[in-house]
Every structure is written in C-alpha cells, then in structure tokens.
Image (cartoon, grey):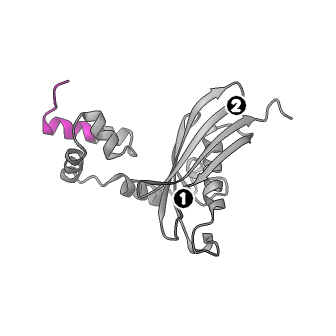
Amino acid sequence: MSRLKKAERQAQLQDKLHQTPFVTDDELAAFFHVSVPTIRLDRLALGIPEVRERLRQMAETNEGDSPVHTNHGGRGILIDISAGQSGILFLRTTEDMLDVSGYVDPQYLYGEAHNLAKQVIGLPAVMSGVGNIKYKKPVRAGHELVAKAEVVRHRGDKFFIWVFVTDKGEEVFRAKFIMETLENKV
C-alpha cells in the first residue's frame, strides 16, 4: 500500500475518529501504516485531543439521564455500547471508594466491570456463571479509569466477556466473565 499524502491522511483520520472516537494512537498508526508520533502530530494539527481527553469530553456531555448512557446503579458513565459485541465505560474514582490502605477498594472495579459486561450482552436477564478477576495495580482517588468490554465468544446461552480497566493507558484490573441467560434456568 502506498502512503497517503499528509492532507489525505488527516482527512481520513478525522473521518475515522468521527466513526470510532475511542481508537488509540497505536491503533491509528497501525491502520494508517505510519508511526505513532506521526498520528500525534496529525491530531495536534487538526486540534483533536488524545483518546483520554476525548473520553473525558464524551463522559461530561453524557452525564444526563439518557437511557443509552445509564449504568444500572453503577458509578461509571457508559460511553459507548454495541450490544452483543463491546462497550466502554468511564469511571472517575472518589475518596469514598478508598479502603483502609488509601487505595480504591477492588469491589468498585469488579462492580463496574460486572455491570459493563451485563450491559454489553444486551439481554434483560443474565447471571454470572464464572468470574475470573485480577487486580493488577492499586488505584488512588481522583483517577479517571476506562473500562473496555468485549464479547470474545458466544456459545449457546453462554457469553464469554473480557473486561480491561486502564488508568492512563496502563492496565490496573481485568475480569473474564462467563455469563448465561436466565431464559432456560428459571
């Protein structure tokens, strides 16, 4: 594939970010077959913020009561959802989430990951058959976390969902769920 001219690449970059606003610079660099610094320079020239800032802006504009962006009692803000495929959630950690050690209690990360996984499935009644979690790095209050969920497999009434929570691009928590519909269980 021949390289695009700068103006062409920047126009396509704007289109790509309009369609999928939560794509990272690394993913964009791979898509356009250029370096990450080239993508950063293109974003800067176009006045497009980095993915974390785009997420923050989206979260601030969607904090209303729109049913698409509610989180069924969770603290996070649902930014994007593709039922049966994937979803993205934004969570700002607060002082009341801290445990006695001064770090965010893992129950909050698990709860948000579980809520996001249930919403990604898009069915009214599901239960967690299996949950495998790993708390990888402690998080303090005042951090802005991004949770991304993806359905990696669907077999019968079982959904295999992976959720990764990052803080400034660094993975701090991950969960792998096997969720089942309740249709044939009750």
Give the percent coordinates (x, y) of residue 84. 59, 33
**Left or right: residue 142 compared with residue 65:** left
The span shown in magenta is 1-13
**SS category of the residue bearing label 2:** strand
Relative to 104, residue 18 above or below: above
Callout 1: 10 Å neighbours few (<14), some, many (20+)? Answer: few
Residue 68's x, y, as percent?
Answer: 57, 47
Q: Is residue 99 left or right of residue 129?
A: left
Front residue of this view, candidates 53 and 128: 128
Residue behind mark 2 = 158
Residue at image point 61% right, 74% down: 101
State the image coordinates of residue 62 (x, y, percent, origin top left).
49, 55
Q: Which residue is mark 1?
A: 64
The image quadrant where one finds the C terminus is: top right
Query: Looking at the picture, does residue 180 appear above or below residue 37?
Result: above
Q: Secondary structure at mark 1?
A: loop
Choose top left, top right, bottom left or bottom right for residue 169: bottom left
Magenta stretch contains residue 142: no
